[in-house]
Amino acid sequence: MPPQMKLALLAIATAIAMAPGALFAASTSSPAALTKQECSACHLQYPSFLLPKRSWGAIMGDLSNHFGEDASLDDAARAKIEAYLKSTAADSNGQSPNWLRAIPASEIPLRISGLPWFQYQHGSRVKNWIKSHPEVGTISNCTACHRGAEKGYFDDE
Ligand code: HEC
Ligand code: HEC
């Protein structure tokens, strides 16, 4: 084998070894499947309809600095996931739900758990419960209390 070809093969092998999921997934998976794969590795897949497009843009634009973790993706996967999240966001159909209209357009919420309606729904009763149940971790661990959170169902209480 000519040395140049060897080098090229080595480069491909290294790339595949380093990012098997990303390389494959970005080109073959549906946007929904790719998002599920990449965005439920560390926590449940947060429902995209609970944040507006601008939030998903900001989150996907700063993945190397993601709530204290490095959640970086290659560019193709990142772009595909961002497009999917925006197309299913709270304001994806050009209209905003009431809770979103209450937030100034200049504000870019980065956490569902930081939204005013969320704070209202999860008052001191819920926060105290988490304190006495350390296995829950943080309020961001939606599935600890909402069994249907992964599918976007929350009215199970
Ligand atoms: C390497 C691990 C990791 C990956 C991968 C990851 N995240 Fe996260 N994410 C975190 C951590 C850690 C937090 C903070 C959780 C907490 O505060 O308890 C977080 C929090 C979040 C929150 C805020 C939750 C809240 O409190 O409302 C959103 C939204 C979010 N991630 C979206 C995503 C999306 C979209 C992806 C896929 C592109 C993703 N995450 C992939 C680690 C990760
Ligand atoms: C420690 C338990 C706990 C955690 C963790 C938690 N919730 Fe909740 N959530 C509740 C309770 C309890 C209520 C009902 C509040 C009430 O009616 O007084 C509620 C209400 C809600 C509602 C309103 C449901 C309705 O029928 O109006 C939504 C939506 C919701 N939570 C989403 C989330 C999301 C998203 C997360 C994660 C980011 C989360 N919750 C984390 C306990 C929790």
Image (cartoon, grey):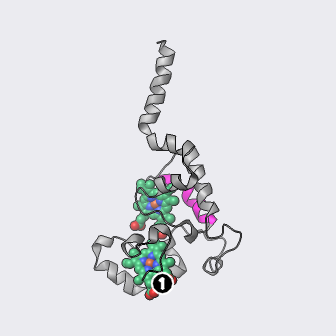
The residue labelled by disc 1 is 121
Q: Nearer the viewer, residue 68 or 60?
A: 60
- Asked whether residue 86 appears in the rendered view, the answer is yes
Vertical order, 17 against 72 (above or below)? above
Give the main secondary structure of the magenta stretch. Answer: helix
Task: Give, as a three-letter code, the residue at label 1.
Answer: Gln
Describe residue 119's horizontal placement relative to residue 30 as left or right: left
Residue range highlighted in magenta? 53-64
Quick check: is 56 in the magenta stretch? yes
Does mark 1 have its CB less than 8 Å from ligand 2? Answer: yes
Estimate the x, y position of residue 40 in percent, counting from the top left. 44, 58
Q: Is residue 111 magenta?
A: no
Q: Is residue 47 above or below residue 14?
A: below
Q: How many marks?
A: 1
| Quadrant field for ligand 2 | bottom left
In this orientation, does residue 75 appear? no
The quadrant holding residue 109 is bottom right
Residue at left 39%, top 86%?
A: 124
Quadrant in the picture for residue 93 = bottom right
Residue at position x 48%, y 68% in the image = 151
| Screen quadrant of the C terminus | bottom left
- Can you say whether 90 is above or below 75 in the image? below
Could you say which is closer to the camera, residue 131 or residue 83?
83
From the viewer's side, name the closer residue of 24 and 55.
Answer: 24
